[in-house]
Image (spheres, rainbow, N blue to C red):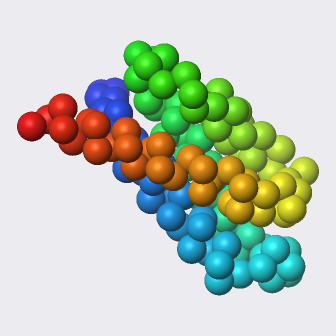
Amino acid sequence: MRERIRDKERLVHILSAIDNLIDGGKRYSVEQAEKDSIIFFGFVKQIEIIGEATYKLTKEFREEHPEVPWNKMEGMRHVLVHGYYLISPQKIWNVINRDLPALRPQIERFIQEKSNDEE
């Protein structure tokens, strides 16, 4: 049986992965992650989760919020999964330090809006 898609839960998954990445980016440098593949691919997995959860959001929700680069988020997951051997640690750190801090408040706001809709 196919799982029923719920936007709020997917947004919570995205927020959790963002928090894991931002926290991890404070604890590890790009150089440390490059030296330890388990740590590095832990970061990669969290970005994959963001992409997969984005893919699972409803088309309607994504269309309601065109200000978010949903297609890029989803596309990055495909690159990381299928091109794992080409991943640049510096690009991962750019996502963590540049893109995610700007995305986090948007996702948090969407979760709050979804919570308000449930009341």
- Judge whether 42 appears above or below 68 on screen: below
Residue at the far left: name it. 119
Q: Quadrant of residue 36?
A: bottom right
- Judge whether 16 appears above or below 99 on screen: below
Q: Which residue does the image show at 29% across and 44% down from the upper left?
A: 112
Q: Which residue does the image show at 59% across and 67% down from the upper left?
A: 22
Q: Quadrant of residue 58?
A: top left
Horizontal side of residue 2 vs 63, given as left or right: left
Viewport quadrant of the C terminus: top left
Position of residue 41 measured from the top left corner of the image (x, y, whole percent): 71, 65
- Judge whether 89 appears above or below 108 on screen: below
Position of residue 99 measured from the top left corner of the image (x, y, whole percent): 68, 50
Q: Which residue does the image show at 83% across and 55% down from the upper left?
A: 91
Q: Nearer the viewer, residue 99 or 1?
A: 99
Position of residue 80 measured from the top left corner of the image (x, y, whole percent): 75, 47
Horizontal side of residue 11 vs 8, given as left or right: right
Q: Is residue 3 visible?
A: no
Viewport quadrant of the N terminus: top left
Q: How many marks?
A: 0
- Judge whether 12 appears above or below 16 on screen: above
Position of residue 70 measured from the top left corner of the image (x, y, whole percent): 59, 30
Q: Which residue does the image show at 69% across and 60% down from the upper left?
A: 96
Q: Is residue 98 visible?
A: yes
Q: Nearer the viewer, residue 115 or 2?
A: 115
